[in-house]
Amino acid sequence: MIKKLTALGTAFFLMLTAAACGSDGGNGGQSDSTEAATENTTQSATDYAPMRTKNKTNKQGLADNIQDGAILHTWCWSFNTIKKHMKEISDAGFSAVQTSPIGQCKVGEDGGMQLQDKDSSINKGKWYYHYQPTDYVIGNYQLGTKEEFTQMCDEAHKYGVKVIVDAVLNHVTGDKSVISENITKIKEPFHSMGDINDYNSRKQVTQGVLLGLTDLNTQNEEIQQYELKYLKECVEAGADGFRYDAAKHIELSTDDKEFASNFWNVVLDNGSKFQYGEILQGGSDKIASYSRIMNVTASEYGEILRGCIVDGDVSAGALTDFAANGIDGGSLVTWVESHDNYCNDGNWSMMDKAQIKQGWAIICARSEGTPLFFDRPAGSSTDDQWGNNKIGEMGDTFFKDKDVAEVNKFRNKMIGEEETLSNPEDDMSVMMIERGSKGAVIVNTDTSDKKLEDTSKSCL
């Protein structure tokens, strides 16, 4: 059978499922229960293993296990904004939302409620103050109060959506005058080493000062217990998981005994169901070691994927491997782009929405890796990085684009199905991701239509 794949202006994808071909038209293995059973219901550093689902989806049709579904990064949205749009998030097929850091943080000059300074003389842009904690309590001036966070979590769970909190445990703000006495009164709360100047040195990476921020003495048991108390407070308020900022800058128990510590063994035992560390690959990252205690980020894969999409060459050979040193794909968090590369490396202007959609279709259709969709600022474009430039408001509505939602729902229906990546008819501008014999997603990065013949053994 011949299938025509339309380019849709700048190219896109075609999804086919067994249900569309007249076979299994059921609910794709969905559970009728919102409390689908899983193995290893909490994750800690002592018993870590990738979560494995028994029952696949909840009554909303979303993955019951965060690891099986797709995450929406509601970057810089307030708690009330996330709550207001929760039904849309659920309807778009996202199984989880990831917040910006929710703890008390340094207050920005002139209100600090713009994402970035478009005019450096005004100095109102302070998105990065999220990442400068002053204390480990829930609530800050940018996102909202603890009560609002709890209400947001309640609303999320009502719609079958889980909540992941971005947690900054490696450091506090570089402005020591605003750090809470709850921290400064602890004996030796900070590391005394200077700035990191050699990223190949594990000692410097884990004990040194990152970007002028005040590095916490993570070997200190009082610091460990204070941060664990905060994480447990988040879980009690409704958080289901955590993303750990700058995770590779906190030592492991397997590091050199001079600076190794039990930090991760302590703080990961917080009762949450999904935890992953930001390990930006490069230098002395030891990503494989971190993957033994938590999920980790596949940052190099995101860079490779963006390059392939921009070049229009989505070779299965280049994109099958996650470029993460042989780590189990089930332990990885993937993305087309993250807030780090969007804000810092300048390649945001290389990809328009159609290209982001192509990359998202590839990572979301795959069986391994937990895909994270970064929501760009509202009003942003390839010509305007910051758009409306407002912290607290909803970002771009692209997260609920019909095609994005459909590939999310495809992912939820295909839980447990093995993947096969290929380039139909050896056309490297087209990638097909087949999931068992039940369905496939085909991505066309060319600007012209394609006609594909005998592309699948399932329903093509």
Image (tube, rainbow, N blue to C red):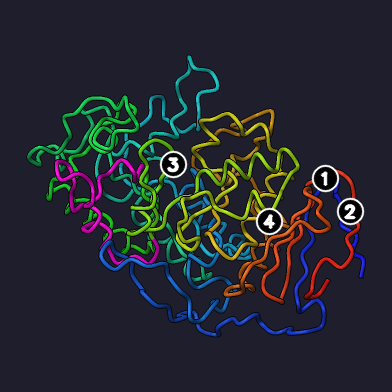
Q: In screen coordinates, is 276 left or right of 30?
A: left
Q: In screen coordinates, is 165 left or right of 264?
A: right
Mark 2 and mark 1 residues within 8 Å of each other at the beta carbon: yes
Q: Which mark, by number, is residue 361?
A: 4
Q: Secondary structure at mark 2?
A: strand
Of callouts 4 and 1, the N-terminal one: 4
**Nearest-to-viewer mark from 3 and 4:** 3
Task: Specify start and end residues of the magenta stretch as a single range.
Answer: 246-274
Q: Secondary structure at mark 3?
A: loop
Of callouts 3 and 2, the N-terminal one: 3
Q: Is residue 135 above or below residue 23?
A: above
Residue nearer the viewer, 368 or 139: 368
Residue type at the position of mark 2: Lys
Can you give x and y, in whole percent of width and height, for residue 440 in the image?
73, 67
Is residue 252 part of the magenta span, yes or no?
yes
Q: Is residue 421 above or below residue 199?
A: below
Q: Main secondary structure of the magenta part?
A: loop
Kindly identify which residue carries mark 1.
446
Q: Secondary structure at mark 4?
A: helix
**Nearest-to-viewer mark from 4 and 1:** 1
Kindly identify which residue carries mark 2.
450
Kindly identify which residue carries mark 3.
280
